[in-house]
Amino acid sequence: MDNCETCLVRNRAICSALEPDELRDLSRIGRTIGIEKGETVIWEGDDAPIVANVVEGMLQLSTSTSDGREQIVGVVYPSDFIGRPFGATSGNSVTSLTDARLCVFTRAAFDRFAQDHPKLEHELLTRTLSELDRARQWLLFVGQRSASERVASFLLEMSRKLSRETCIAAPVPLDRFDLPLGRRQIADILGLTIETVSRQLRRLRDRKIIDVPGRRTIEIQDRNALEHESGRD
Amino acid sequence: MDNCETCLVRNRAICSALEPDELRDLSRIGRTIGIEKGETVIWEGDDAPIVANVVEGMLQLSTSTSDGREQIVGVVYPSDFIGRPFGATSGNSVTSLTDARLCVFTRAAFDRFAQDHPKLEHELLTRTLSELDRARQWLLFVGQRSASERVASFLLEMSRKLSRETCIAAPVPLDRFDLPLGRRQIADILGLTIETVSRQLRRLRDRKIIDVPGRRTIEIQDRNALEHESGRD
DNA sequence: CGATTCTTTGACACCTATCAATCTTAGTGG
DNA sequence: CCACTAAGATTGATAGGTGTCAAAGAATCG
């Protein structure tokens, strides 16, 4: 790996659990790669040969059914960990939604390193537990929320997440931002169709809760109303 | 705890990662409790004071929305681990669906023990990773499957799970079994209403794929057809 | 520009939730 | 042992929300 010292996620990724010298050891078995939007780095069903930290960008975790439908089961952001260490096959594909940078390790090397560094494992464990909670929260979301609630929640989440990207110091939700995803992807994330997403955006626009000046630009005009639409979560 | 030697889940729960002497140490900080059907042992939002292994029975993990709807986000079986160690608040309630037996630890004691036993943490980590995969699989399920697919899958899952309960050695799916759940609970698990569940069961019965001799008894008459209904997963 | 891709919009059908009534079962007390 | 009751389950009628299909409208890229 190039230089952990200047790494954007140095203090947020699992590496934060390590001492400087341990970090140097870890850096020796990893390397940073750039990937393009749309690239799939891990395939569902493979026993993926790699694991990685997300340094920059946004990626989707997805599973598909035998009849071709696809559901996005998670979205990961910088500092999140991807891949399935310790020898089980990956249950989902990982595909980048935007251009991205990853700090990757071969699974074998990572497994070995983790074995010798319980602190790292502990950190990974607490993260995984949180991730599990998030997944279950999402379950609630997809299982019981109406299309309008889903779209509203999605916009709010984006507004929060994107602000972290632009300005880590002051995570104030943005009122205007560009979606890094197309309608197709939004629909897959929310478990809806593109048409329904489109119609819901229209409805929010008609009611002056948001504006959609460009195809991918969102401007939140009435945040309270949007939160109300989301079902207050 | 009473006696790990005779414990039903000794070889399947996280304890399986420990040596006999370590196990004895762990047993000193835990104890076995019986709980009744319907009892809630962990409440959503609390920073639950306990964690536990499920020894016997079936419990649900659930989250509820501000407007009172409830979604079951997971079901746990013997040998599964419940609770949220390492100081975060629990994102969901844990309620027993049947009478059950748990092997409980105070969170503080468990956290301390885990710190000194990386093997235990490692085991917990791999389990949590698997659990995460399961949750994401379920997400696909709730997000994209029709009512008939959900009910069919549910019956198949039950047929598998219940056979493990009755005969650990030979996990052959049962063709006739009693559901430990009422319609309300099934509906919550599947993200449907009780009426829809009822109608789907009727439909399967009409087509001679299953029989429902008693309110809670299911008899699978055409397993292939049922698997076909489930969308083959 | 022309072509391709993405998005919006419309009409329609279908699935599931909702509401309401009936039927069944289990539990209770006379 | 038999009403009686309350809870659970089934069934029916209806309405509403989404998906589907089809077409038209923007935007992007060569």
Image (spheres, coloured by chain):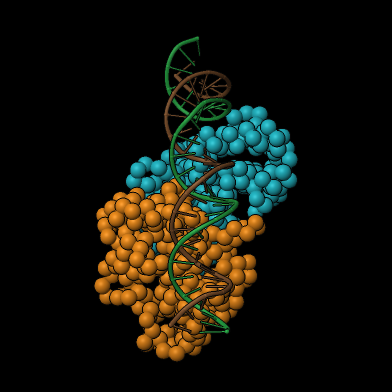
Chain colours: A cyan, B orange, C green, D brown
- Find residue B26 and report its horizontal and vertical position in percent: 47, 84
Left or right of residue B232, residue B109 in this image: right
Q: Which one is nearer the viewer's eye here, B144 or A133?
A: B144
Q: Which one is nearer the viewer's eye here, C17 or A217?
A: C17
Left or right of residue B1, residue A200 in this image: right
In this rendering, the answer to whether A144 lies above or below B91 is above
Q: Which one is nearer the viewer's eye here, A83 or A156?
A: A156
Identify which residue is drawn at 43% across, 88% down: B24
For the question of whether residue A1 can be seen, the reply is: no
- Find residue B118 and report its horizontal and vertical position in percent: 46, 74
For the question of whether residue B131 can be seen, the reply is: yes
In this rendering, the answer to whether B77 lies above or below B101 is above
| Res B47 → quadrant | bottom right
In this rendering, the answer to whether B201 lies above or below D7 is above
| Res A233 → quadrant | bottom right
Identify which residue is drawn at 59% across, 29% down: A215
Left or right of residue B13, residue B222 in this image: left
**How many numbered discs sit on the rendered protein?**
0
- Find residue A117 and report its horizontal and vertical position in percent: 46, 68
Left or right of residue A139, residue B157 in this image: left
In this rendering, the answer to whether A25 lies above or below B82 is above
Identify which residue is drawn at 30% across, 61% down: B220
